[in-house]
Image: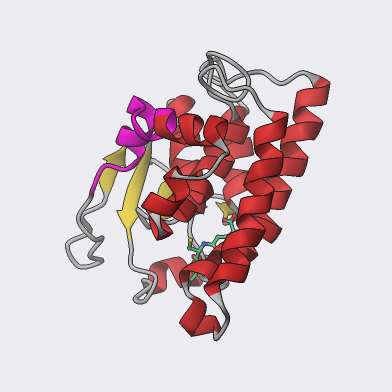
Amino acid sequence: MTLPILYSFRRCPYAMRARMALILTSKQCELREILLKDKPDQMLKISSKGTVPVLQFSNKVLDESLDIISWAMESNPSNVHIYSEAEEIFSIELVRLFDTKFKHHLDRYKYSSRYDVEPQEHQQECRVILEALEAKIDPSPWIFGSTVSLLDISILPFIRQYKIANADWFLDQNFTKVIALLNYFESSDLFTQAMQKYDLWDPVKNNGNIFP
Ligand SMILES: N[C@@H](CCC(=O)N[C@@H](CS)C(=O)NCC(=O)O)C(=O)O
């Protein structure tokens, strides 16, 4: 059987959430680790927008992380929290917020000189979003209880990037439930497995890796 091919970049939060969905639903693929500054032609040929993750099948290509997650969830979703209707609406809205507003400010906080902006303003905008999240969740240990959810895997990679930008400052903030949730995520087997390091894919050697 030919495995689907996943073009991935280890530190990309979108690729992380896709890899976690594949792990949770036991979907095997050939992982091709790439560099964003040197994207392989093989990937650009099937997805000209040039973002990761990209999942290539013999008959279709999925090049949006949420589409890859939806595909993975079509079968064997038993390790993932099943949403109630209200939880699903709550989650869709939050994922949208993190993919748009939070990501916008996160990029400007992390790369303020590239955007020629003051980082503090954007650090604060993200903080406001995390304080609002803090008021809405009661993780135990995941957002909806003992089983990890698509909401957890979708937003935590972004919150982690926010932490990494200034960990001392982050850990001093009063969104303590969010901090505990992130700690739990970062020490989980799921995250460890998703962050395993692979050699860069070399089209000549064709050294893809079976994942997970
Ligand atoms: N909406 C896309 C966004 C993916 C995305 O923007 N990925 C970034 C890396 S984190 C990327 O590939 N950027 C292209 C580049 O930097 O050249 C998804 O959810 O898959």
Give how far across and how far down residue 149 sits, in percent.
Answer: 58, 26
Q: Is residue 206 above or below residue 175?
A: below
Front one among 112 and 120: 120
Residue lying at 44% horizontally and 51% vertically, measured from the top left: 163
- Pick the quarter of the image with the C terminus: top left
Give the position of the N terminus as an image quadrant. top left
Q: Quadrant of residue 64?
A: bottom right
Residue at the far bottom in the pictured view = 116
Is 205 displayed left or right of 15 in the figure?
Answer: left
Q: In this image, 70 relative to 86: left or right?
A: left
For the point 56% across and 72% down, the residue is: 108
Q: Residue furthest left?
A: 205
The answer to whether residue 71 is above or below residue 107 is above
In terms of depth relative to the viewer, which is nearer, 22 or 75?
Answer: 22
- Residue 69 percent across, percent down from the top left: 58, 39
Examine the rendering and report whether any part of residue 98 can be seen.
no
Report whether residue 159 is seen: yes
Query: On the rendered structure, is 192 left or right of 91?
Result: left
**Nearest the eye: 118 or 152:** 118
Picture quadrant of residue 95: top right
In front of the other: 5 or 172: 172
Image spot of residue 204 (x, y percent): 20, 68
Name the residue located 50 percent from the left edge and 34 percent from the top edge. Answer: 21
Report the magenta residues as a range.
184-197
Q: Is residue 63 magenta?
A: no
Residue 193 on the magenta segment: yes
How far from the left and from the top, in percent, is residue 25? 49, 25
Which residue occupies 44% across, 66% down?
Answer: 43
